[in-house]
Image: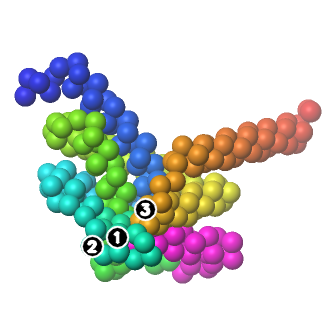
């Protein structure tokens, strides 16, 4: 236990925590999208339950590292590429994420979500809720494969990895609701978030085929898009402020 309180261990814990939080951004965005059809009163519970169960899955993946490493062994060869269990998981996760994001983009562009919102019941059935929780778990586990392997590459102290993952999930639980509300209040930002999920899905599919795409280019494009969106928010705020000043008596 004493070795976990050294400066080196604390630095490793901080690094791992930041890594898990950064890699969890796409997971938070998916949470915001997938829980949109759940009544407001139940969304927080569904998000926390899904993330809690996903954390258990991540911990099991860390403890079963030998099993996780075994997923890299090729099972069969197709079109010149040896597909492993990990590749198949990434392919399935990427296809599902892309399908989910494209479906949501269709709803937003065709205003289908407004019609669905008018018909949304006060509560959803246990089966529907279980389906949403399952989606959160499955996507999180797909995202977690690379993050777990990266974490293990940084340190062999599994306790530190588990602590960092727990902190990251708690951070996601805390901010997921606020981020979801912010995304849904700004249609342009929601479209950007959905486009980001499509991009992540394509990256997972490419990984499944053994094609490594440089993440830095992708993240730069995303940050650039967010910066442009922030400028749009600034312009809208100034425009609204100017309009209020002109409408104020005595101006």
For residue 234, side relative to residue 118 (left or right): right
The disc placed on residue 210 is 3
Q: Measure how far apart labels 3 and 1 are at the Cα level.
A: 8 Å
Query: Of label 3 and label 1, which has the lower sequence position?
Result: 1
- Quadrant for residue 249, please give it: top right
Residue 190 image point, x, y percent? 61, 59
Q: Is residue 56 visible?
A: no
Residue 179 image point, x, y percent? 50, 50
Query: Of label 1 and label 2, which has the lower sequence position?
Result: 2
Residue at image point 51% right, 48% down? 215
For residue 232, side relative to residue 221 (left or right): right
Q: Camera-side residue: 221 or 212?
A: 212
Answer whether labels 3 and 1 touch (C-beta < 8 Å).
no
Residue at image point 37% right, 57% down? 143
Kindly identify which residue carries mark 2.
75
The disc placed on residue 83 is 1
């Amino acid at each position: 236990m004493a070795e976990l309180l050294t400066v080196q261990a604390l630095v490793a814990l901080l690094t791992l925590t930041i890594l898990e939080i950064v890699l969890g951004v796409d997971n938070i965005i998916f949470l915001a999208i997938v829980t949109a059809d759940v009544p407001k009163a139940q969304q927080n519970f569904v998000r926390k339950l899904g993330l809690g169960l996903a954390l258990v899955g991540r911990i099991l993946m860390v403890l079963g590292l030998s099993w996780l490493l075994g997923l890299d062994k090729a099972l069969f060869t197709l079109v010149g590429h040896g597909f492993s269990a990990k590749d198949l998981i990434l392919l399935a996760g990427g296809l599902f994420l892309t399908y989910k994001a494209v479906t949501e983009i269709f709803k937003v562009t065709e205003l289908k979500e407004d019609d669905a919102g008018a018909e949304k019941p006060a509560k959803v059935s246990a089966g529907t809720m279980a389906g949403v929780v399952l989606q959160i778990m499955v996507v999180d586990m797909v995202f977690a494969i690379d993050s777990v392997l990266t974490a293990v590459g940084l340190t062999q102290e599994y306790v530190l990895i588990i602590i960092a993952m727990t902190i990251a999930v708690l951070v996601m639980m805390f901010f997921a609701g606020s981020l979801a509300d912010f995304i849904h209040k700004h249609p342009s930002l929601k479209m950007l978030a959905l486009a980001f999920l499509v991009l992540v899905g394509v990256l997972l599919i490419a990984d499944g085929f053994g094609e490594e795409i440089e993440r830095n280019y992708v993240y730069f494009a995303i940050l650039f898009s967010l910066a442009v969106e922030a400028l749009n928010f600034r312009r809208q705020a100034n425009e609204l402020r100017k309009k209020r000043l002109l409408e104020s008596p005595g101006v």
